[in-house]
Amino acid sequence: MKDMADNLFITLVTIMTIALSILIASAGGLLFVNAGDVMNGWKKGIRIMAYITPETRESDVAGLRETLAKMSGVRDVRFISRQEGLESLKAQMKRQMSLIDNLDINPLPDAFEIFMNPEEQTFEKIETLAARVSALDSVDDVEYGQAWIGRFTQVFNLFKFIGITMGILFFMVTVFIISNTIRLALYSRRDEIQIMRLVGATDGFIQVPSYIAGLIQGAVGGMVGLIALYIGYLAISANIEKNFSSYVIHIRFLPWNVVLGIIVYSVFVGWLGCFLSLRQFLKNN
Amino acid sequence: MKDMADNLFITLVTIMTIALSILIASAGGLLFVNAGDVMNGWKKGIRIMAYITPETRESDVAGLRETLAKMSGVRDVRFISRQEGLESLKAQMKRQMSLIDNLDINPLPDAFEIFMNPEEQTFEKIETLAARVSALDSVDDVEYGQAWIGRFTQVFNLFKFIGITMGILFFMVTVFIISNTIRLALYSRRDEIQIMRLVGATDGFIQVPSYIAGLIQGAVGGMVGLIALYIGYLAISANIEKNFSSYVIHIRFLPWNVVLGIIVYSVFVGWLGCFLSLRQFLKNN
Amino acid sequence: MSELTKKHPIVRMFHVYKRYGAKNALADVSLDIDFNEWVFVTGPSGAGKSTLLKLMYRGETVSEGQILVDGSNLIRVPQGQVPMLRRKFGVIFQDFKLIQTKTAYENVALVLEVAGLKPQLVRKKAQNVLRQAGMEDKMNQYPPSLSGGEQQRVAVARAIVGDPKIILADEPTGSLDSRSAAIIMDLLKGYQSRGATIIIATHDKEILSRTNQRIIYLENGRVMDHGMRTDVERNE
Amino acid sequence: MSELTKKHPIVRMFHVYKRYGAKNALADVSLDIDFNEWVFVTGPSGAGKSTLLKLMYRGETVSEGQILVDGSNLIRVPQGQVPMLRRKFGVIFQDFKLIQTKTAYENVALVLEVAGLKPQLVRKKAQNVLRQAGMEDKMNQYPPSLSGGEQQRVAVARAIVGDPKIILADEPTGSLDSRSAAIIMDLLKGYQSRGATIIIATHDKEILSRTNQRIIYLENGRVMDHGMRTDVERNE
Ligand SMILES: Nc1ncnc2c1ncn2[C@@H]1O[C@H](COP(=O)(O)OP(=O)(O)OP(=O)(O)O)[C@@H](O)[C@H]1O
Ligand SMILES: Nc1ncnc2c1ncn2[C@@H]1O[C@H](COP(=O)(O)OP(=O)(O)OP(=O)(O)O)[C@@H](O)[C@H]1O
Ligand SMILES: [Mg+2]
Ligand SMILES: [Mg+2]
């Protein structure tokens, strides 16, 4: 059939368009998955240090631990003696080692290290908890880790928000471009469709091949996009590993359920593109 | 003219496609411009600390300064006395202040802080310079700031590489999608074009309206894309400013020459899309 | 078809108007066409012949008046039933309306596929009817590579392949030499004898002068002459 | 056009073949058509009439043989000069080939715009020729809203509007009643009297039987009869 050759071109255009949309969108997804990994790594590092007043008696420390452990949002509490504290400080300060070597006494207080449940770890929650811990009698002072991580969480959340907004936008854009591609394809078939109707074809008969084509194009486009992403991923991660050994975080590919979701999504997009363009086309032609 | 209504749809599709391509590509550009700003800010912070051996005489220090200042890639050299060093250390360590208060003597050596020319500031250059400084007799030890910034530069360069690769890919994708949209539009006009040829129209006569349309579509699409980007920029920067006051870096819009370049580029894309599709179309039809 | 046979009108029109803007393409047309009848519709260019046929298969809808086809009132046929209505007709369009991207064979077979026939039956019927129209050896060519007359014969084949109750032929011999035209007319006569109703719009003086069938003469959208079957000779 | 007038051939064909695959659409056709002559081409459906005309304006290229048009050898005309060659012709295509998305007026005006005429002149000429073809009141309609005969008259108007040297008319009256057909033939006669050469492919017995012009009879791609102008009566 001659229309196969004509249609082949249009089919390829549609598949390429879907593949590119999926590639770009899922590259964004890959970025988020890995940025999320990094964020989670950092989040695990967030803890609140509660420095205990020197006057606190040994026996009260156990009570304090209980109190802290019962506070909402707290996952774990660890006691760090002043000796431990000095050791870790020494470990942190390589250069200024001599500075610590010259110490006569240990100036550090005992402390509790408080870990939070990662799910509940928002900037606000950390601040609230820190305030409540700080209000306790036996607590001299509170330091909640790298405060910038809290800030960073907010920046990350902002980017997540931008990402989701762009994702929705991108979804609409993809559907738009694809339904237009399909509509242009139908457009070049409008004489044919008109004639089919005149010889008694139902809308169903006319639509079925378009739907089948749409679903196949969606599936193939999605897979091509993902394969391209995977190749890109391999190239980049190889590059990163070569240049940075395991220094920088290990990047991983999209989990298989997301991959599956993307293919389902692209089939859906193929279908939706067909649905929208066919409905409008058959109404107007 | 009735074909205006038909063409209007195809014209809108083309413009929207160009606008979306430009939006996505220039959003990437915006990200890079601002990431570049941040990087440059960080780069300015990179310096090499050269700790001077305690035995060095006062008079030799001046000579050392000269030697350092003459080294290639060095922009500025600043002497930091051991007193100054201790002060800044105290400033850095809020919590462990008591630790320093308990010091009997100042354990720090005198040092030179060496700043590099930002243009020449690659990771390799920093390492080379540090090695050469370290080889000097009067230099006890060398510390080049936050080594991670060097690493970070490399990550950034990798991303820049990915960005440029994606940019080129995106350029091709844009041209591809647009030339296909235009080709599909021509496709639905192929009877018309064939008839025009039969009544003696030259290829030029047939092409001119398509080219004009292509250029206008390119320009309008580019502008629509940039306006959409600007609106998005305003929304996001307002959001950032509200949430983080001036804590996070101030983000800026694309400089005007880049904006101009993008419009020129989108006009060029419109033209190229026409050129490619027309050339092939007129050959085959 | 003697005058004694009881009439069973298959198409009935009552005061039908079709307007395009201010223009009446058809005005106050009333007529009955009997089951198994053979009718010619003639008249000058732009008289409304094609419009008359279009209204019957609901290619257009009436502006005013009523049309009954095979007992059902066209304005009452719901949109979803229009394909069923159209399958009662075999239409030879004035401009052929062949699908340019399908071969002659595929164009003909489409009618049967649309009706849901089995593939082997489709093949047999479509090939058979193309043979009758003298297009056997060209059935794998695409319309643009066929001569005008060849395209017309494919259009005829497509119209009759589905064994429709009513054949609407709009200028079915306009692109044909007299020998090819005679073959087509014989083909249509064969279908009539198997029970079909035949309605032909034509300018062809030669065909009109030879017939003893009813001729409906249109001018400016109005029926000027109902030409009963008995008045064989017509003065144009 | 007496026999004494010296012949100036405007179209010359020498042993022309046109093959589509194994099929000869035209075989060994040699003929001369004189400047200002009026020639009919006839023959059964698929004989090669349209193909013969297509070769003249280089709608197709010959498989073998040579064609001279107005002194230039068609196979030597470079691709870039084809538009110029085509402007010498006014072609009435068998399937009209009107642009569906342009009005009747725009379709006719296109020929003049293509040739680079001034807008006011375009308007005047196009409207004038549409009036002559009897399409004055429908010139702002689109082809799909015109009747078959009306479309054909627009096609005729388009063919003559550019004052071409040669008019190629492929079945120019196929969709027309005899009165409209007579108007078109008169229009063409007027053009001949102003110096144009007229070549008409037709089946129309009525027209052929009335003429005293040369008739070229094709069958199976071969010229069976060159019909010199003197032999008025033809046996088909
Ligand atoms: N969609 C339309 N819009 C406006 N006018 C129309 C439309 N369709 C048909 N007409 C007009 O209606 C009139 C009748 O058209 P119709 O096609 O029925 O004529 P016809 O008798 O078949 O003529 P012909 O012999 O030339 O084919 C014509 O004048 C035509 O211009
Ligand atoms: N592109 C093509 N490919 C294959 N065969 C073709 C092509 N064009 C024409 N033919 C064949 O060439 C033959 C002559 O065609 P042509 O159109 O010249 O006939 P014609 O004399 O004009 O007939 P009609 O009176 O039916 O219009 C036909 O049999 C046709 O099928
Ligand atoms: Mg008609
Ligand atoms: Mg022909």
Image: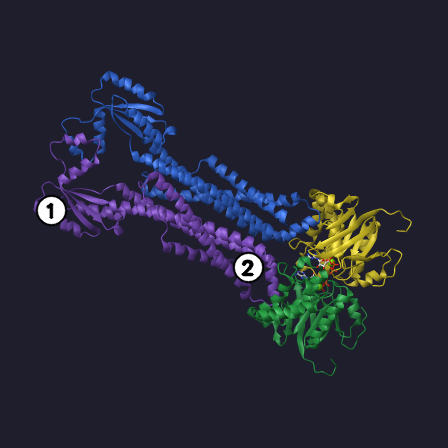
Chain colours: A blue, B purple, C yellow, D green
Residue carrying label 2: B281
Label 2's element? helix
Residue carrying label 1: B61
Q: What is the tally of numbered marks visible in this picture?
A: 2
Label 1's element? helix
- Judge if badges 1 and 2 mark residues of a common chain: yes
Rounded to the nearest whole Å, what is the CA distance between mark 1 and mark 2?
76 Å
Residue at image location 38% in from the left, 41% down from the top: B239
Question: Which quadrant holds the N terminus of chain D?
Answer: bottom right
Q: Chain of mark 2?
A: B
Ligand 4 is in which quadrant of the figure? bottom right
Q: Chain of mark 1?
A: B
N-terminal of the pair, mark 1 or mark 2, is 1
Residue A275 found in image quarter: top right
Residue at image location 36% in from the left, 36% down from the top: A154
- x and y, in percent, of residue A173 in the image: 49, 45
- x and y, in percent, of residue B44 in the image: 25, 47
Question: Is A78 or C157 nearer to us in this picture?
Answer: A78
Question: Which quadrant holds the C terminus of chain D?
Answer: bottom right
